[in-house]
Amino acid sequence: MEGVASGVPNLALHEPDDMTDLSHPPAQDAAPTADEPLLLVEREAALLRLTLNRPAQFNALSEQMLDALDEALRNAADDPHLRVIILGARGRAFCAGHDLKQMRAEPSLAYYQQLFARCSRLMMRIQQMPQVVIARVQGLATAAGCQLVGMCDLAVASDTARFAVSGINFGLFCATPSVALSRNLTRKQAFEMLVTGDFIDAAQAQSRGLINHAVPEAELDAAIDALCARILEKPVAALRAGKGLFYRQMEMGIEAAYQLAGQTMACNMMDECALEGVQAFIDKRSPAWKA
């Protein structure tokens, strides 16, 4: 269950030195109009940009936002021409976790179980996607928002971004965010964040393994574009097989992991992209992969 400890929900939490209640957004952040979707979807050839569009609510994961993001990912998974997905957000925060006001409106265990199960399915879908998913973190990422960063395949953040799983400060243990956190950071680093509620900055997030790169805010898009360009140069069949293998083998014992990896590599070697790539290496030329 998403952030449930003794039947208590994990909430979108604020920084200790910022007394702003994230359930009451600041007036200067403009909310989407009735005609503006909660999730912006932009397609650029083999690249898809998904942008959380609730800036006034710190891009909290309301039920509607969960549904919109899940639908967009399900549609993208079936697209054979799509290779990279960038998950970003508008406003001061990347994502502050679940929607507090919505959660407080129906304080029942059954409702929370259903909500957090839905969120967990979304988080798992990101890793089950055949495409590479990159988090574009321009601001604050807390609780389930930090979890969202951890579940993406890659993450690039502004050097002003901050990260936390602060539930413990309010008597809550960020249980399911701990699943993503412990699969990115070392055990002791992850556990320290979970039991202290402390924030870490982008440089610390990079050094601990939560994100790949921390760059100046003005260079964030350029850094992500450069990373995407390097991935888009690679053959789609190898990328898709490789991503699937990468996550499956991590949950296995070493012997089973090697068996699965060997089988995956053998099948990959029979694919046109590998045959062309190896022949190009032998011929000392650039490979001519099919799009």
Image (cartoon, grey):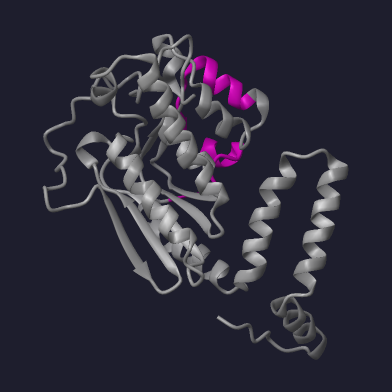
The x and y percentages for residue 128 are 57, 50
The x and y percentages for residue 38 are 24, 47
Q: Residue at x 60, y 70 (%)?
A: 236
For the record, the magenta segment spans 189-215
Toward the viewer: 51 or 186? 51
The x and y percentages for residue 13 are 35, 23
Q: Residue furthest front?
A: 110
Q: Is residue 202 above or below residue 105?
A: below
Residue 19 among those drawn in magenta:
no
Q: Residue furthest right?
A: 255
Quarter of the picture holding the C terminus: bottom right
Give the quarter of the image for residue 118. Answer: top left
Q: Residue at x 68, y 86 (%)?
A: 286
Give the quarter of the image for residue 21. Answer: top left
Q: Residue at x 82, y 66 (%)?
A: 266
Toward the viewer: 54 or 203? 54
Toward the viewer: 41 or 27? 41
Q: Is residue 184 left or right of residue 261?
A: left
Q: Is residue 237 left or right of residue 114?
A: right
Residue 170 visible in rendering = yes
The x and y percentages for residue 247 are 67, 47
Q: Is residue 266 above or below residue 259?
A: below
Give the quarter of the image for residue 57. Answer: top left
All told, the count of numbered labels is 0
Q: Residue at x 51, y 66 (%)?
A: 83
Toward the viewer: 104 or 194? 104
Q: Is residue 59 above or below residue 132?
A: above
Residue 213 visible in rendering = no
